[in-house]
Image (cartoon, rainbow, N blue to C red):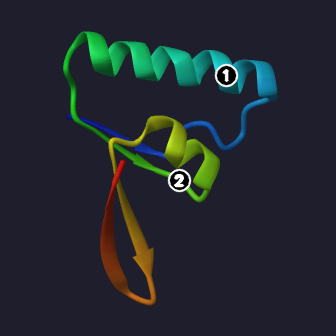
Amino acid sequence: MLCLDEPLSALDEDTHQEISELIQRITREHDMTTLHITHSRRESEYFADVLLCLRDGMVSAEKR
């Protein structure tokens, strides 16, 4: 399992794209479960098979 907490938040656009593709490739090649924590909806939609959203202290799941 890979746990990532805002891994792309401080990157420039080119590096953001490069690292995003790297994370996605590694997790798929190794069939790895990844918990990717982010405030970016766009980023979560790019990576997620299942979205877990924290709203008002409650966690809800959204299938992708």
Front residue of this view, candidates 6 and 44: 44
Secondary structure beneath dot 1 equals helix
Q: Which mark is residue 40?
A: none
Distance from the alpha carbon under mark 1 to that under mark 2:
15 Å
Characterize the local packing of mark 2: few (<14), some (14-19) or many (20 or more) Cα atoms within 10 angstroms.
some
Secondary structure beneath dot 2 equals loop
Residue in the image at 77% along x and 19% along y: 14
Among numbered discs 1 and 2, the one appearing first in the sequence: 1
Residue lying farthest to the bottom in this orientation: 56
Is residue 6 among the parts visible in the rendering?
no
Measured from the top left, where is residue 33 in percent x and y? 22, 34
Characterize the local packing of mark 1: few (<14), some (14-19) or many (20 or more) Cα atoms within 10 angstroms.
few
Front residue of this view, candidates 4 and 58: 58
Residue with the mark numbered 1: 17
- Quadrant for residue 11, please give it: top right
- Quadrant for residue 32, please give it: top left
Measured from the top left, where is residue 46 in percent x and y? 53, 37
Measured from the top left, where is residue 64 in percent x and y? 36, 47
Residue in the image at 53% along x and 53% along y: 38
Residue with the mark numbered 2: 38
**Picture mark count:** 2
Q: Amino acid at mark 1?
A: Gln
Residue in the image at 68% along x and 27% along y: 16
Q: Amino acid at mark 2?
A: Thr
Q: Is residue 52 left or right of residue 22?
A: left
